[in-house]
């Protein structure tokens, strides 16, 4: 369902946008000249923006200090970072050092079957998950890797940028639900709008968890690979699509 078919009642009381970053707030991997002004316009309209990304804690800790956002969930639900420097671990991990070793060992085990895999350059800045580049992986490759992770006791997801090996039950929706309850108890789920573009955003498209969701148009590339799809889809892709949504929200 496109934004043209959007029920205005769905937008009338939105107070917080929980948005993916890469492929949703970016254009060709970069922030555009209109990016900051759009965030400021939403802020002026009384709409908070919370980033929910698969990017590393190290990468995200810089973003929350420079952007007009209320915080960011990194590593697909692993951690919550706030502009004041506070950091909450959202995933239940008892020994982080041992956890990192187990993640790396899992990656090397998978690499035996897929020797062309390259670990992402930001793994040194990660805490809860392990990533490798999604380039040149076929749908069958991704399914085989997902199955292998499952057999080894891990969960797996991927985006337009990276593949993620992560703890079971760690996903964007679970992390977002925890953050909303702990940090934004005054906001109910009918006031939350989730936005994304790829399979690692799928949990946020689950209507049973978040009733109002939007995918930017590039999400349609994955529609046959996802169980949960967004309630609405923008006409444009990437940040242009997000901007389309933001303007509609501000007008509403």
Image (cartoon, rainbow, N blue to C red):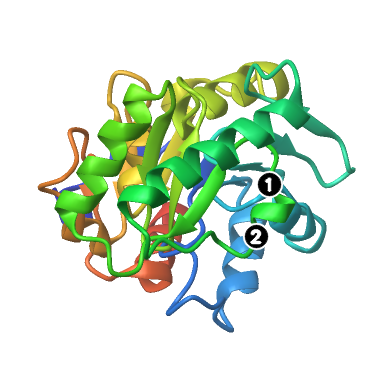
- When asked about the image quadrant of residue 99, the answer is top right
Q: Which residue is mark 1?
A: 126
The residue lying at 65 percent from left, 71 percent from top is: 36
Q: Which residue is mark 2?
A: 122
Q: Answer with left or right where residue 121 lies relative to residue 233.
A: right
Residue 45 percent across, percent down from the top left: 60, 52
Mark 1 and mark 2 residues within 8 Å of each other at the beta carbon: yes
Residue 54 percent across, percent down from the top left: 53, 48
Q: Nearer the viewer, residue 199 or 118?
A: 118
Q: Answer with left or right where residue 204 lies relative to residue 233.
A: right
Residue at the far bottom: name it: 33
Residue at the far front: name it: 112
Q: Give how far apart the Cα atoms at labels 1 and 2 are.
A: 7 Å
* 243 is higher (above) or lower (below) than 199: below
* 6 is higher (above) or lower (below) than 219: above
The residue lying at 13 percent from left, 48 percent from top is: 1
| Helix, strand or loop under label 1 | loop
The residue lying at 38 percent from left, 36 percent from top is: 156
Residue at the far left: name it: 224
Residue 79 percent across, percent down from the top left: 68, 34
């Amino acid at each position: 369902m496109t934004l043209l078919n959007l029920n205005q009642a769905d937008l009338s009381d939105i107070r917080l946008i929980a948005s993916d970053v890469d492929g949703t707030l970016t254009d060709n991997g970069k922030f555009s000249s209109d990016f900051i002004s759009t965030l400021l316009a939403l802020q002026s309209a009384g709409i908070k923006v919370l980033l929910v990304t698969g990017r590393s804690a190290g990468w995200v800790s810089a973003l929350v200090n420079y952007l007009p956002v209320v915080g960011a969930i990194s590593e697909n639900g692993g951690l919550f970072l706030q502009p004041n420097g506070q950091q909450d671990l959202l995933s239940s991990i008892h020994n982080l050092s041992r956890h990192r070793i187990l993640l790396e060992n899992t990656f090397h085990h998978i690499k035996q079957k897929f020797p062309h895999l390259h670990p992402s350059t930001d793994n040194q800045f990660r805490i809860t998950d392990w990533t490798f580049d999604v380039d040149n992986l076929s749908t069958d490759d991704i399914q085989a890797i997902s199955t292998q992770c499952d057999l080894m006791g891990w969960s797996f997801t991927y985006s337009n940028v990276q593949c993620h090996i992560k703890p079971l039950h760690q996903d964007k929706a679970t992390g977002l639900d925890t953050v909303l309850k702990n940090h934004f108890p005054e906001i109910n789920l009918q006031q939350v709008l989730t936005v994304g573009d790829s399979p690692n955003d799928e949990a946020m498209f689950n209507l049973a968890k978040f009733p109002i969701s939007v995918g930017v148009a590039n999400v349609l590339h994955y529609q046959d690979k996802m169980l949960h799809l967004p309630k609405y889809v923008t006409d444009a892709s990437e940040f242009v699509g997000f901007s389309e949504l933001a303007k509609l929200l501000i007008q509403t």
